[in-house]
Image (cartoon, rainbow, N blue to C red):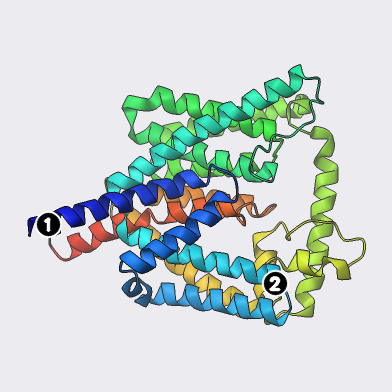
Amino acid sequence: MGYSLTNNLKKTQIDNIIIYLSFLSVFAHYSVPIIFLILSSFYIALFRKNKGNFKRKHIICLLVFTFYSAIVGLLNKNFNGFAYSVGLFLIIYFCVWVKNTITNKVFENALTLCCLAGLLTSIICIAEKVILILSGVSEKHRSTLYFFNCNYLATVLAIVVIICAYKFIFKKANRLICMLIALLCAVSIYLTGSLFAWIEVLVGIAVLLRATRRHQLLSILMLTIATVCIILYFAPEIIPRPQDIVATTNNRVGIWKTSIDIFKKSPIFGRGFMAYKHLLPLYPGGYKTSHSHNIVLESLMDFGFIGSILLSIYIINYFKRLFVCRGAQSKTFFSSLILALLIGLIAHGTTDLTFIWTQTGFLYALLMCGIGPEEKLLKINENGVG
């Protein structure tokens, strides 16, 4: 019995380490999360029991959607889209295990690791900018680091800022540190030149304050936003790349028009992940990019009505479970944080789809696993145990 207890303890420690590393992997080079997912999936398949976790209806629905998107991609010879479907399956496989394994303490520690990793990333980002300025490089340079795209870097930092807001509210002993990390991340977001990441930050924090009933802080945030808007009206040059706003807007409109044309050609079944990039050669003059820059258009274009309905069923179910957990008034408030992050993602998703990437997408999926401990606690309370 002693050996069995020791063995279980070691397995738990290994599980926790893997979970911590999964969160840290998204702050490394964009290839690291892919390698980590593959290796971790082999570990789970060989040494951990995960099969039973897929019997829930919402998970089955999500797996059916993944299989559907893969078939649609293959039938349209969209092999890049097929690869995205495989990647999505790996994320689902790993995150289903994480959701059923992670505890309150481990998730809270993982959030702390995100803040610390965000701090390190911001320091590197700011140092890069200083070195470039000293080297005489144009100030128009947009910080990207090892995130492939500056907007992906901005999105990860935006997530860290919202997590810092959560820590600021509930971890009073470390408020000064949270403020410092959030400030440095905000500076780094500015250096990326991303305009829409600010929408995600502001909407996410506003939802978090509203969900946790911090009405006074919410009022201060609204007043601050209003003040900043007035300042920007009279001094628009403060905004990063103000001269690009009109061009960026026109590009978005052009992308949306092309995406609508693609959707009209296959409204029922779609064309698979990243259909815009796959079919762009058929639309001369279309703006060269990877996706539609709108979350609704992307879903309809890639998966058609059938795939979009399958995906919507899972999303609606997840939000229902999220609101049930939030209504239960758990002491952790993880559900409020997740709600803030997802609403922020949706707000950002009206103009860009930065979550469709190895680092950003994986990070969002990992954070969504935070509902697991609250669901377990809710189930225990309903059964009258504990």
Q: Name the residue under label 2.
A: 79
Q: Is residue 118 left or right of residue 236?
A: left
Mark 1 Cα-neighbour bin, 10 Å: few <14, some 14–19, many ≥20: few
Report the residue at 78% width, 77% height from top: 264
- Where's residue 282, x and y in %? 87, 71
Kindly identify which residue carries mark 1. Answer: 3
Q: Give the residue at x 19% y 61%.
A: 380
Taking depth in this image into account, of 287 and 117 the one nearest to the observer is: 117
Q: Residue at x 60, y 73 (%)?
A: 308
For the residues labelled 2 and 1, say whether their Cβ atoms are less than 8 Å apart.
Answer: no
Residue placed most toward the observer, 243 or 61: 61
Q: Where is residue 113 in the image (x, y as percent from the top left)?
A: 41, 38
Give the percent coordinates (x, y) of residue 14.
Answer: 31, 51
Residue type indicated by callout 2? Phe
Furthest-front residue in this view: 3
Q: Height in image: 93 above or below 121? A: below
Helix, strand or loop at label 1? It is helix
Q: Quadrant of residue 167?
A: top left
Mark 2: secondary structure: helix
